[in-house]
Image (cartoon, rainbow, N blue to C red):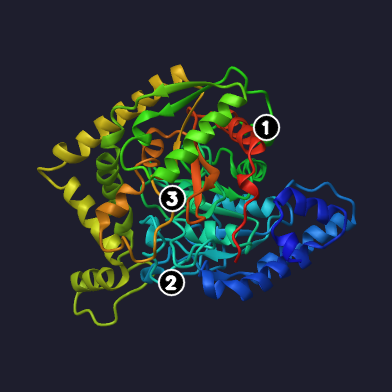
Amino acid sequence: MNELLKMTASKQREALLNKEISAVELVNAEYSRIAAVDEKLGAFNSLCKEQALETAKEVDKKIAAGEVLPPLAGIPLALKDNINLKGTKTTASSKILENFVSPYDATVSVKLKENLIPVLGKVNLDEFAMGSSTENSAFKITRNPWDTNKVPGGSSGGSAAAVAGFEATLALGSDTGGSIRLPASFCGIVGMKPTYGRVSRYGLIAFASSLDQIGPFARNVEDTALLLEAISGHDPHDSTSLNLPVPAFSKALNKDIKGSKVGVIKELLAEGVSEDVKKAVEKAVETYKSLGAEIVEISLPLLEHSIGVYYILATAEASSNLARFDGVKYGHRTKDAKNLLEMYTKTRAEGFGDEVKRRIMLGTYALSAGYYDAYYKKAQQIRRLIKEDFDKAFEKADILISPTCPNTAFEIGSKISDPLSMYLTDIGTISANLAGIPGMSLPCGLDRNGMPIGLQILAPVLGEEKLFNMAYNFEQATDFHNLKPAI
């Protein structure tokens, strides 16, 4: 059974259709696995067994009746705990929402149900998706399956750890500045952020609305493509959702890439990148050369400003979005307030963790009278210029590549008291969110301590098909996606 849990979604589907295993047995096997290892990993905040088994039973009925099923029907998935699933706890890993039970489904949750994908449970994250290590959760620290003394990355650390630790075959996360790609890199799996607006944000607990995107995690590129197909599409509930048909991403794989231009981002291979990471990415460049791609050096001169721009815009939007958590409508409310103002103040002081408070204060300051023009407006102008940098780069190259992160997973506790060092972890990923372009991290090697290294591939807006094809060709030419942690 353990071997089955280590398979890709496509292989598990074969086993289901050949009746080697039932969907109910597969879901129960995942629950046994969670019971066996989640104490070590700390990936799950809550389980939704009844819902998952109901879906699995429906899949088994349809297989028995010979019905045609969606490609991922019956394949177990872990859902990041900031995405609403009706009747389950949705906490954003925050005390302020500790006992909040979702009264409705996020659009992606509706799509998972339509595709008969069993949701095993909700997985841990940095509180309100603010962090790069999943150490900012109010409930627990999630650990990396490759080395449980190390972080899994963040903020979608629970999603990545669940897939890498064989507690789920697939997962959904959200990516505001690298929160899918970074944990995918640290945990040695595939994680993908779609073009902004490709996937509905309705029902995702908002952090920074102009940057947030929901995206898939899987063990290989094909499964990632299938999951993105399942969750994409226009949604009238989300005004930023793109009204475009959903391409068959999984059919875009394995096209010849001879003559394609691969741009290597010069600034992301400069100082500050660990030697092991640099070597792995240089090897990846050689792999693309051997596949017939042409390599071009790309400079993104404004990249160095992306962290500054991001931490003004994202915190400004967070300050506005998190104003709704006031103890009045839902969530935690302080027990002993003498008046309304004290109720607001005490509720938020008790309910939010340090990192969330830090970002709310930064954002409120950037939006305050006298500072708006100096900070927020200036950051928006530079964001526009960063997007133009990418537009120019994509005139010279089909895709851009870089390390997902300058380093591999670090020890738990080593950066938690140094916010700036933690923020710099996202130097490679943030700019894709500012520009609204799709990006993916996929395994490209191990460092000297046996920890996974991620290769980041970026494509132009709505360039997912190109992105998947270039990623798939690299994956098929290498063996890194078959490396597994020993947990």
Q: What residue type is labelled 1?
A: Leu
Find residue 140 and name its label: 2
Q: Which residue type does callout 2 highlight?
A: Lys
Whether residue 318 is visible, yes or no, is no
Query: How many neighbours does mark 2 have within 10 angstroms: few (below 14), some (14-19), or many (20 or more)?
Result: some
Q: In this view, does 371 lie to the left or right of 214?
A: left
Q: Is residue 190 or residue 273 the one in the foreground?
A: 273
- Return the residue found at the far bottom: 336
- In the displayed structure, 130 sits above or below 1; it is above
The tag earlier along the polypeptide, 2 or 1, is: 2
Horizontal placement of 95 versus 246: left or right?
Answer: left
Q: Quadrant of the N terminus?
A: bottom right
Image disc number at residue 253: 1
Callout count: 3
Q: Position of residue 308 (x, y in %)?
A: 24, 42
Disc number at residue 179? Answer: 3
* Separation (CA) of disc 1 from disc 3: 25 Å
